[in-house]
Image (cartoon, grey):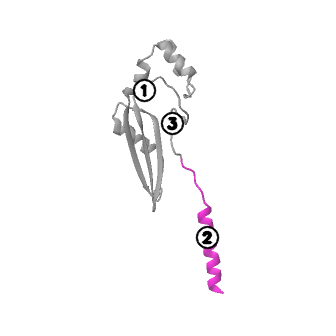
Amino acid sequence: MMLSKFKLFALIVLAGILSVSCSVRLVDFTAISSKNVNLNVNTSEGVKTEGSKSYVFGFGFNIKDALDLALENAGPEYDMLMDGVVRYSNYFFVATVEVEGTAYNSRNIRTTMTKAEYKNWLINSESLYVKNENILKGIEEN
């Protein structure tokens, strides 16, 4: 009888542990889309790059680390990844995130346009979310 109570207690504890959930921030982004978007960017200026990060037991899992590594591998002047692919794999207690795409320098996009074209691009681009209206005001003042 004692053994069956122990098994019941162990089962309840195990069920409780497995039912506990947590939330994890996967990635912070400036612009993101799963649709094909024409950003009028010279694709020859981009650099193909990739980054990978592994996590034991999945602790600390996030996509941002792999994205940052991909941009660091491209070079210090690159700050934006386009046409990217994120892959997740899980092998015996090790979770891995792999990111590959084309790295761009966002300043190069701005320098190819006049101030009016850039402002129009920011306002009308379906793929961008302008969080701070001061960005548009700053363009008007310059």
Kindly state the secondary structure of the residue where label 1 is placed: helix
> Mark 1 Cα within 10 Å, few/some/many (few <14, many 20+)?
some
Which region is colored magenta? 1-24
Residue 74 in sight from this viewpoint: yes
Q: Reply above or below: 58 against 10.
A: above
Around disc 3, counting alpha carbons within 10 Å, would you say few (fewer than 14), some (14 to 19), or many (20 or more)?
few
| The magenta stretch spans residue 38 | no
The reply, left or right, for residue 42 in relation to residue 3 is left
Instruction: Provide residue 137's location: percent of width, then percent of height.
Output: 53, 17
Tell whether label 1 touches label 2 (CB within 8 Å).
no
Residue located at (35% from left, 30% from top): 77
Q: Residue at x 47, y 44 (%)?
A: 86
Q: Which amino acid type is shown beneath numbered disc 1?
A: Ser
Q: Position of residue 94 (x, y in %)?
A: 44, 58
User: What residue does disc 1 label?
Assistant: 106
Which class describes the residues within 10 Å of circle 2: few (<14), some (14-19), or many (20+)?
Answer: few
Residue 113: name its quadrant: top left
Residue at x 54%, y 34% (from the top left corner)? 33
Number of the front mark, 2 or 1: 1
Question: Label 2 is placed on what type of residue?
Answer: Val
The disc at residue 29 is: 3
Going from N to C along the chain, the mark reached first, 3 or 1, is 3
Residue that badge 2 annotates: 13
Please report whichever mark, 3 or 2, sits nearer to the chain's N-terminal start: 2
Q: Tell me the SS state at disc 3.
A: loop
